Image (tube, helix red, strand yellow):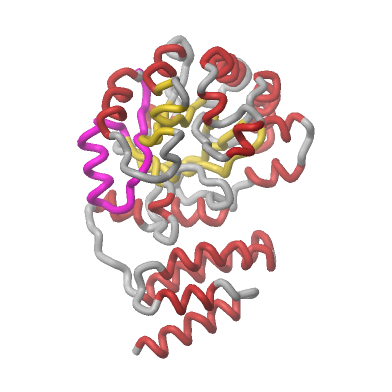
């Protein structure tokens, strides 16, 4: 029986997982504006193993993710924890798939032996993936970087070739690069040819042009778009429709306000505080953006957001 990764139309456009960003509201918006697949924020398999209800709330979907498929991403380093976690995710959350993080460069994640640190231990990585595939019927995907320490993505693919990995998303930068510098399209192309499954290229896609270049030069089945979607959830539609018409200020504010209202319904006043960073991303590139961002960093409720927008539009005329 085929899983959704095998049946979804290509090129696949996915909202890549981002801690503190790909929450239910943002996933919903990206699904509404063309994302085929949306990933949750990173969820700790270890915290789930120890019964953290806060961790389960991270995975809750905002009613629906538009038409997008929903994938829960887990991180950790203990196969036993992953075996438990995937069972709970399948039973309680019922997403379309589960992903394992092998690429996160954050130091505190590394201290736990997870993310890109786990990637560097091929045997333990194999045990983790096997624990997942053995304990759920949901398709298992993984996200990695092209290199961490002495281990490359090609080494990783070779060691995991006996496992039923449905999709591989590869960030085209090394662990040392973090999120800076160009993605290595040549290595992504080599990884694409070596991996027998759905392959998503990730890293540095900021518009339709860079998306088309990455697809063409890597031969990927699709793209994972992360930072390029911040403040621009409509990037997925632009890539699909091959149109990059810039949205005007009123259109951007309308989407940003929709986003803010969802954040408030989901998290109350805390949601508005968390919305500040999104509002600053929405303001990027607008004339007078510096002053607008200053106002957005002060908002505490929806009325504050509306006032900042009204004032900006009035003075922009």
Q: Quadrant of the N terminus?
A: top left
Residue 13 visible within the image:
yes
- Give how far across and how far down residue 173 sits, in percent: 38, 36
Q: Residue furthest top?
A: 162
**In which quadrant will I find the C terminus?**
bottom left
Task: Please say if 187 is above or below 124.
Answer: below
Q: Nearer the viewer, residue 63 or 21?
A: 21
Q: Residue at x 70, y 24 (%)?
A: 81
Locate residue 152: give its quadrant: top left
Q: Position of residue 55 (x, y in %)?
A: 70, 42
Q: Which residues are magenta?
A: 196-221
- Kindly identify the residue that appears in the image at 41 percent across and 16 percent down: 155
Instruction: Please give left or right for residue 279 compared with residue 33 in the image.
Output: right
Vertical comparison of 227 with 50: above or below: below
| Coordinates of residue 154 in the picture (x, y in percent) | 37, 19
Which residue is at the front of the view, 202 or 256?
202
């Amino acid at each position: 029986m085929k899983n959704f990764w095998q049946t979804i139309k290509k090129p696949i456009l996915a909202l890549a997982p981002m801690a503190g960003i790909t929450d239910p509201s943002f996933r919903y918006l990206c699904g509404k504006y063309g994302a085929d697949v949306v990933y949750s924020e990173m969820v700790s398999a270890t915290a789930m193993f120890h019964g953290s209800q806060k961790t389960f709330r991270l995975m809750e979907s905002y009613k629906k993710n538009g038409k997008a498929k929903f994938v829960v991403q887990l991180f950790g380093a203990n196969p036993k924890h992953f075996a438990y976690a995937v069972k709970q995710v399948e039973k309680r959350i019922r997403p379309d798939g589960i992903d394992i993080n092998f690429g996160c460069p954050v130091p505190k994640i590394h201290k736990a032996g997870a993310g890109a640190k786990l990637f560097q231990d091929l045997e333990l990585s194999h045990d983790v993936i096997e624990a997942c595939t053995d304990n759920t019927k949901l398709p298992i995907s993984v996200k990695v970087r092209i290199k961490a320490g002495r281990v490359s993505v090609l080494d990783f693919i070779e060691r995991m070739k006996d496992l039923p990995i449905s999709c591989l998303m590869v960030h085209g930068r090394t662990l040392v690069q973090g999120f800076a510098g160009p993605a290595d399209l040549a290595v992504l192309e080599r990884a694409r040819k070596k991996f027998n499954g759905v392959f998503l290229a990730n890293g540095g896609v900021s518009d339709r042009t860079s998306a088309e270049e990455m697809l063409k030069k890597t031969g990927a089945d699709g793209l994972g778009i992360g930072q390029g979607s911040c403040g621009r959830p409509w990037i997925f539609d632009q890539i699909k429709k091959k149109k990059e018409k810039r949205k005007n200020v009123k259109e951007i504010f309308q989407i940003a306000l929709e986003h803010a209202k969802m954040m408030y319904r989901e998290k109350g006043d805390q949601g508005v505080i968390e919305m500040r960073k999104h509002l600053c991303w929405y303001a990027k590139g607008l004339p007078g953006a510096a002053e607008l961002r200053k106002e957005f960093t002060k908002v505490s409720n929806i009325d504050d957001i509306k006032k900042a927008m009204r004032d900006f539009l009035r003075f922009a005329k």
